[in-house]
Image (spheres, rainbow, N blue to C red):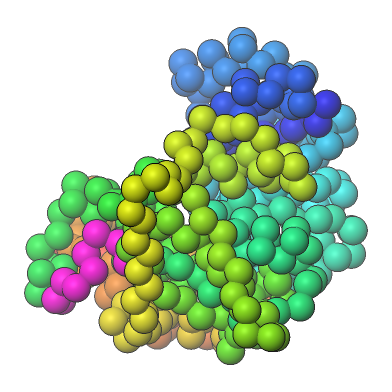
């Protein structure tokens, strides 16, 4: 019986973690859980799973951090979205807990600080993103296994082939209509701009100690191939499956075993075409910015993320155009100096400063 402390239980990933527990009640138990705010959903979850500890982060942050360090938990599953999830990861790592990581900001913003911290405390970070779960599987669940190249796949989003003029007219409703995946609003917009894929490159660099020169991204429109690994002899291994997050979510809890899910399996009883299209960085300016920030490191990826969080919210609220997401992020980065990253406090400061700059820029845009 694996005991789980779940952070972000009412979000898209958190709900799928609970689905996995329902499917395999003899294998998993929720012993602690948190959600951002009070809701009928969270109340129902508490009643169903009877955790020993539960907390609402918006009203009691300290209690939510206690969930991240809950002594009786075997594994902490961080499904909190945004920069807010980083502090929970730090808390779980310092408590020596195995960390199933769905919060990409932990590695995007925290970078080497997080990987050093995990090494110091002997903590394993288990990837939950479909792309990183795919790479992890291809490497035989061994993040230190040797490889020649990591190849991340991207669907290309709903606007592949659009001109800049067409992108200026994109509405939030159009941007939230991802062609292959069902996800939360923030990550769906980041997938439409391809910034999310840039984040995943940064994560791959940290998770697998991979030089950026050994990480490649290709367009795979149907999202059937989740990622690939090329080895020294020229062979390439791919992980395939329907685009359904319940598979990598559950695998983070069951590995190295694969257990049943409700995901629809791929059918080979009819023709199945898998297409790969080369990806050019300059076609996706936010993806390009992410790779530049990742390579420069320090506090820049944190500033990138903060500016994007503010800009995406402004777009969803109808305050700026889709293309203004890039303009806002680019402005913030052009006025931000890189600092060497040595502490969590630096990340808080970098996040706060970038948000202020982004809000100020958006205010001018909307006048």
In which quadrant of the rendered view does residue 288 lie? bottom left
Instruction: Tell me, yes or no, if residue 53 can be seen here.
Output: no
The magenta region covers: 155-164
> Residue 24 location, x and y as percent?
68, 24
Residue 177 is one of the magenta-drawn residues? no
Instruction: Tell me, yes or no, if residue 121 can be seen here.
Output: yes
Which residue corresponds to the image point at 18% horizontal and 63% vertical from the top-left?
321
In which quadrant of the rendered view does residue 311 lie? bottom left
> Residue 38 location, x and y as percent?
51, 23
Q: Is residue 150 above or below residue 169?
A: below
> Residue 4 location, x and y as percent?
75, 32
Majority SS type along the magenta span: loop
Q: Is residue 161 above or below residue 221?
A: below
The N terminus is located in which quarter? Answer: top right
Q: Is residue 138 above or below residue 180?
A: below
Which residue corresponds to the image point at 56% horizontal and 42% vertical from the top-left?
247
Could you tell whether 196 is left or right of 127 in the image?
left
């Amino acid at each position: 019986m694996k005991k789980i402390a779940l952070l972000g239980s009412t979000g898209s990933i958190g709900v799928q973690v609970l689905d996995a527990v329902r499917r395999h009640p003899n294998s998993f138990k929720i012993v602690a859980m948190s959600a951002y705010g009070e809701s009928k959903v969270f109340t129902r979850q508490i009643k169903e799973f009877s955790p020993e500890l539960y907390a609402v982060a918006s009203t009691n942050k300290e209690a939510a951090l206690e969930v991240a360090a809950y002594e009786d938990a075997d594994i902490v599953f961080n499904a909190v979205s945004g920069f807010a999830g980083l502090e929970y990861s730090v808390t779980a790592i310092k408590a020596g807990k195995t960390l199933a990581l769905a919060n990409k900001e932990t590695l995007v913003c925290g970078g080497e600080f997080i990987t050093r911290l995990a090494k110091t405390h002997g903590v394993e970070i288990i990837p939950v993103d479909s792309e990183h779960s795919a790479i992890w599987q291809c490497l035989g669940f061994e993040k230190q296994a040797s490889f020649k190249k990591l190849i991340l796949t991207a669907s290309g989003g709903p606007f592949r082939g659009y001109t800049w003029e067409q992108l200026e007219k994109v509405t939030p409703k159009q941007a939230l209509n991802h062609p292959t995946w069902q996800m939360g609003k923030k990550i769906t917009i980041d997938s439409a701009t391809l910034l999310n894929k840039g984040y995943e490159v940064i994560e791959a660099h940290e998770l697998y100690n991979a030089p950026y020169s050994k990480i490649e991204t290709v367009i795979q429109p149907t999202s059937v191939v989740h990622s690939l690994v090329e080895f020294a002899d020229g062979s390439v291994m791919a992980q395939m499956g329907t685009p359904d997050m319940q598979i990598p979510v559950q695998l983070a809890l069951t590995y190295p075993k694969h257990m049943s899910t409700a995901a629809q399996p791929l059918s080979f009883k009819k023709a199945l075409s898998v297409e790969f299209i080369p990806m050019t960085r300059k076609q996706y300016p936010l993806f390009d910015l992410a790779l530049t920030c990742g390579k420069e490191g320090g506090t820049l990826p944190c500033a990138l993320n903060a500016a994007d969080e503010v800009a995406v919210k402004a777009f969803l609220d109808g305050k700026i155009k889709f293309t203004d997401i890039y303009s806002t992020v680019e402005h913030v980065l052009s006025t931000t100096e890189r600092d060497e990253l040595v502490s969590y406090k630096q990340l808080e400061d970098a996040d706060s400063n970038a948000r202020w700059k982004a809000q100020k820029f958006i205010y001018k845009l909307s006048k």
